[in-house]
C-alpha cells in the first residue's frame, strides 16, 4: 500500500472498469448481449423455484448465470468492447439475480427473511450515497476483487442451499456448504459496500 503526498492512504482499487461520463455507450456489443441473455434467466429461475419447485433445474440456471457473469467481463476486455451501458448493465443484472434468488429462497423457506434484509440494506445504503458518486464523474461503482468475490460466493451459496432440500446426508452436507458460501459472501458484499461508501465520501469531500 502506498501513501500519497497529502499523507492520506488511498483506497486500493484492484480493478476499476467504471468509465466516466464521457465514455461510449455502445449498447449493441457482444458482452451486453450476454448480459441481456442473463436477464432472461431471472423469470425462468423464479418460475422453476416457485411454480415447478424444480430445484435441480433452478440450480442449473443459477450456475449458468454465475458463469456467464465472468464471460461477459472477459469478452468486454478481450474484444475491447467496454461501454458505459455495459458498466451499468452488468452489476444491475447481478443485483437482480441476487434479489430474485433471495426472494425465491425466502418464499420457499430455504433462507430466512433476515438475510434478505441484510443484503438489500447494503444496496439501499449505497443508493443514498450515489449523488456523491455522480459528483466524482463516474456513472457506476468501480469493480473490485472484494465485490466480485462476494457476488461469486453468493451466486454459488444460493444454488447449493437450494439443493440442501435433497434428502439424507447429501442434502445436509450441501446445506452446510451453501450456508458457508452465503454467509461469507454476505460479509464480503457488505465489506465491498463499506469500501465503496468510504471512497465516495472521500471523493465528495475532495471536490
Image (tube, grey):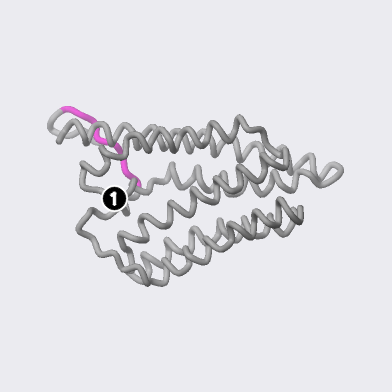
Secondary structure under the numbered disc 1 in the rendered image: loop
- At a point 43% along the width and 52% down the height, the residue shown is 91
Return the x and y of residue 99 as percentages of the image width and height. Answer: 55, 45
Q: Residue furthest right?
A: 168
Please identify the dominant SS of the magenta region.
Answer: loop
Return the x and y of residue 154 as percentages of the image width and height. Answer: 57, 44
- At a point 50% along the width and 37% down the height, the residue shown is 120
On the rendered structure, is 57 left or right of 15?
right
Return the x and y of residue 122 as percentages of the image width and height. Answer: 45, 34
Looking at the figure, which quarter contains the C terminus? top left
How packed mark 1 is, by other alpha carbons closer than 10 Å (few <14, some 14-19, many 20 or more), is many
**What range of the chain is rendered magenta?**
7-14
Quadrant of the rendered structure where residue 61 is? bottom right
User: Which residue is under mark 1?
Assistant: 139
Quadrant of the rendered structure where residue 175 is? top right
Looking at the figure, which quarter contains the N terminus? top left
- At a point 30% along the width and 52% down the height, the residue shown is 18
Return the x and y of residue 144 as percentages of the image width and height. Answer: 38, 46
Q: Residue furthest top?
A: 7
12 within the magenta span: yes
Tag count in the figure? 1
On the rendered structure, is 36 left or right of 11?
right
Q: As rendered, which of 97 and 168 lies closer to the eye? A: 97
On the rendered structure, is 68 left or right of 4?
right
Q: As rendered, which of 39 and 66 lies closer to the eye? A: 39
Q: Is residue 153 above or below residue 117?
A: below
205 within the magenta span: no
Amino acid at each position: 500500500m502506498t501513501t500519497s503526498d497529502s499523507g492520506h492512504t488511498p483506497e486500493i482499487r484492484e480493478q476499476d472498469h467504471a468509465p466516466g461520463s464521457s465514455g461510449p455507450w455502445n449498447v449493441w456489443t457482444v458482452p451486453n448481449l450476454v448480459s441481456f441473455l442473463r436477464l432472461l434467466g431471472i423469470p425462468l429461475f423464479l418460475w422453476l423455484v416457485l411454480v415447478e419447485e424444480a430445484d435441480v433445474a433452478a440450480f442449473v440456471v443459477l450456475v449458468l448465470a454465475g458463469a456467464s457473469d465472468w464471460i461477459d467481463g472477459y469478452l468486454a476486455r478481450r474484444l475491447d468492447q467496454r461501454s458505459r451501458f455495459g458498466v451499468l448493465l452488468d452489476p444491475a443484472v447481478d443485483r437482480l439475480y441476487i434479489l430474485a434468488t433471495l426472494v425465491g429462497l425466502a418464499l420457499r423457506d430455504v433462507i430466512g427473511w433476515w438475510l434478505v434484509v441484510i443484503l438489500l440494506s447494503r444496496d439501499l445504503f449505497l443508493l443514498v450515497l450515489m449523488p456523491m458518486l455522480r459528483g466524482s464523474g463516474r456513472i457506476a461503482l468501480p469493480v473490485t476483487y472484494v465485490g466480485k468475490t462476494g457476488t461469486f460466493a453468493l451466486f454459488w451459496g444460493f444454488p447449493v442451499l437450494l439443493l440442501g432440500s435433497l434428502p439424507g446426508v447429501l442434502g445436509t452436507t450441501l446445506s452446510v456448504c451453501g450456508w458457508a458460501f452465503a454467509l461469507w459472501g454476505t460479509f464480503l458484499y457488505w465489506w465491498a459496500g463499506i469500501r465503496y461508501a468510504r471512497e465516495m465520501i472521500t471523493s465528495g469531500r475532495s471536490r
